[in-house]
Amino acid sequence: MSDNHGNTPAAWTAVVVALVGFVVGGVGLMLSPISFVIFWIGVVITLASGVLFLIMAKMGLHESATH
């Protein structure tokens, strides 16, 4: 288990992108009438954050700076 507790560029980038996805999806649900297209775009952005994290981790951006 890593000792960085998520304080890496990969983790922070994934969290920010996921947050953007949640906001986009939430805006889609708050519109009147509800825009399911915008909601699903938010879902895709949120899921893409996981893929982005895996790519960045493979690039070595999820390693502790104390190594």
Image (tube, rainbow, N blue to C red):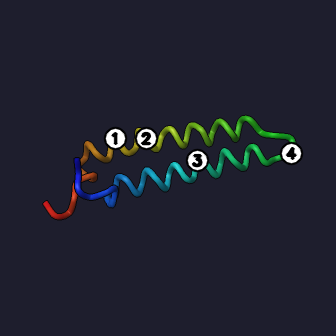
Which residue sits at x=22%, y=58%?
64
Pick whichever of labels 3 and 4 is earlier in the sequence.
Answer: 3
In which quadrant of the rendered view does residue 5 lie? bottom left
Position of residue 31 in the picture relative to residue 37 (left or right): right
| Tags 1 and 3 touching, CB below 8 Å | no
Residue beneath label 4, please? Answer: 32
C-alpha distance separating marks 2 and 4: 30 Å
Residue beneath label 2, please? Answer: 50
> Where does residue 18 sit, x and y in percent of width and height?
52, 48
Residue beneath label 3, please? Answer: 21
Position of residue 33 in the picture relative to residue 41 (left or right): right
Q: Label 2: few (<14), some or many (≥20) within 10 Å?
A: some
Pick whichever of labels 1 and 4 is earlier in the sequence.
Answer: 4
Q: Between residues 64 and 54, which one lies in front from this camera angle?
A: 64
Residue beneath label 1, please? Answer: 54
| Tags 2 and 4 touching, CB below 8 Å | no
Q: Amino acid at mark 3?
A: Gly
Q: Amino acid at mark 4?
A: Ser
The kind of secondary structure element at disc 2 is helix
Q: Quadrant of the C terminus?
A: bottom left
The kind of secondary structure element at disc 3 is helix
C-alpha distance separating marks 2 and 1: 6 Å
Q: Amino acid at mark 1?
A: Leu
| Tags 3 and 2 touching, CB below 8 Å | no
Position of residue 27 in the picture relative to residue 5 (left or right): right
Q: Label 3: few (<14), some or many (≥20) within 10 Å?
A: many
Which residue sits at x=64%, y=52%?
23
| Tags 2 and 1 touching, CB below 8 Å | yes
C-alpha distance separating marks 3 and 2: 11 Å
Q: Label 1: few (<14), some or many (≥20) within 10 Å?
A: some
Which residue sits at x=29%, y=46%?
57
